[in-house]
Image (cartoon, rainbow, N blue to C red):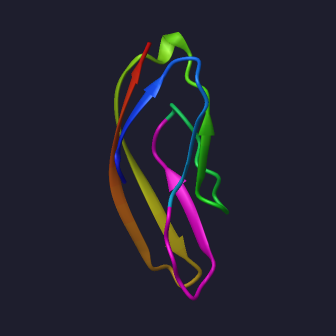
């Protein structure tokens, strides 16, 4: 995952990339945004109240239970 710089009031759109021969499911551990569990898309517009620094983890799991976790970092600015 790249280091994200996001601006309050602007749409943020990013799709987590992962490949497998099995269907994949995406999860995150943050309240800042939700990752679409089927597509891996992160799509949200942060508010001024969200300005700050955030660490989060994205987990990708396949039908066989194999998984990969990756840490991300996001800064929400004005």
Tag count: 0
Residue 29 is situated, as x and y percent measured from the top left of the image, at 45, 45
Question: Is residue 27 part of the magenta span, yes or no?
Answer: yes
Question: Is residue 68 part of the magenta span, yes or no?
Answer: no
Q: Is residue 18 above or below residue 65?
A: above
Main SS of residues in magenta: loop
Q: Is residue 36 left or right of residue 75?
A: right
Q: Is residue 3 above or below residue 27?
A: above
Q: Quadrant of residue 70?
A: bottom left
Magenta range is: 17-30
Q: Is residue 55 left or right of residue 12?
A: left
- Taking depth in this image into account, of 22 and 12 the one nearest to the observer is 12
- Taking depth in this image into account, of 58 and 48 the one nearest to the observer is 48
Instruction: Identify which residue is drawn at 51% across, 33% down.
Output: 31
- Taking depth in this image into account, of 24 and 29 the one nearest to the observer is 24
Quarter of the image for the C terminus: give it.
top left
Instruction: Identify which residue is drawn at 49% across, 49% down.
Output: 28
Residue 7 is situated, as x and y percent measured from the top left of the image, at 48, 22
Residue 61 is situated, as x and y percent measured from the top left of the image, at 51, 71
């Amino acid at each position: 995952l790249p280091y994200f710089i996001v601006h309050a009031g602007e749409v943020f759109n990013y799709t987590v990339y992962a490949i497998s021969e099995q269907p994949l499911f995406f999860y995150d551990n943050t309240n800042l945004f939700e990752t679409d569990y089927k597509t891996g898309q992160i799509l949200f517009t942060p508010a001024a109240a969200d300005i700050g620094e955030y660490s989060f983890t994205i987990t990708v799991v396949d039908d066989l239970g194999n998984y990969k976790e990756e840490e991300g970092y996001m800064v929400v600015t004005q």
